[in-house]
Image (tube, rainbow, N blue to C red):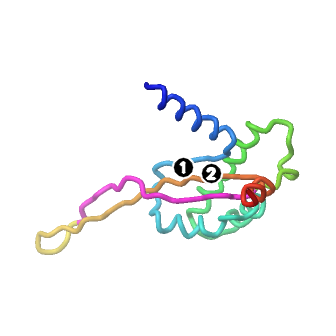
Amino acid sequence: MGARKRIRANKIKESKKNQYFAKLRNCPTSPRKMRLVADMIRGMEVNKALDVLKYSSKEASNRLEKLLLSAIANWQEKNEGVRIEDSKLIVKEIFVDGGRTLKRIQPAPQGRAHRIRKRSNHVTLVLDNLNNNDTQTEQ
């Protein structure tokens, strides 16, 4: 690895130390359905987002609730001795990308076949402090 790549890699590594995120890979739900639930909690405070996900009737909300709890655990790992209630965490970013698609065949009349696409997705959730978010926008 060259010097420039090493310096760039170290910068990226340092910036990730200040981010609190969790990723969900290859979730067997279509990205379109997952985005509906992700849009509900984008920008919300963490406790309110957990309540919304807990009482949502969508099937994808269970998976996003677990992902949010994982992101909170990652935040606690990096911030020992700080209470969550005092920090005012918010869901800064949440985005859903398409994952791999399993292609299956459904038999159809007269010897034909229809293709069934079983879609999956990748979800990335980033947390941030509410007061950190304000100071970044002022600069």
Q: Are marks 1 and 2 in contact (CB under 8 Å)?
A: yes
Rendered image quadrant of residue 38: bottom right
Q: Is residue 28 above or below residue 32?
A: above
- Quadrant location of the C terminus in the rendered image: bottom right
* The N terminus, quarter of image: top left
Q: Indicate the amino acid at tag 2.
A: Leu
**Residue receiving disc 2:** 67
- Asked which secondary structure carries label 1, the reply is strand
Q: Residue at x 36, y 60 (%)?
A: 118
- Provide the major secondary structure of the magenta segment: strand
Residue range corresponding to the magenta coloring: 90-106
* Residue 93 is a magenta residue: yes
Residue 113, given in percent of the width and then of the height, sits at 18, 67
- Is residue 111 shown left or right of residue 52? left
Given residues 69 and 55, the one toward you in this image is: 69
- Give whichever of discs 1 and 2 has the lower sequence position: 1
The residue at which mark 1 appears reads as 24
| Residue 31, image x, y percentages | 46, 63
Amino acid found under the numbered disc labelled 1: Leu
Q: Residue at x 66, y 65 (%)?
A: 41
- Left or right, 107 with respect to 135, comes to left
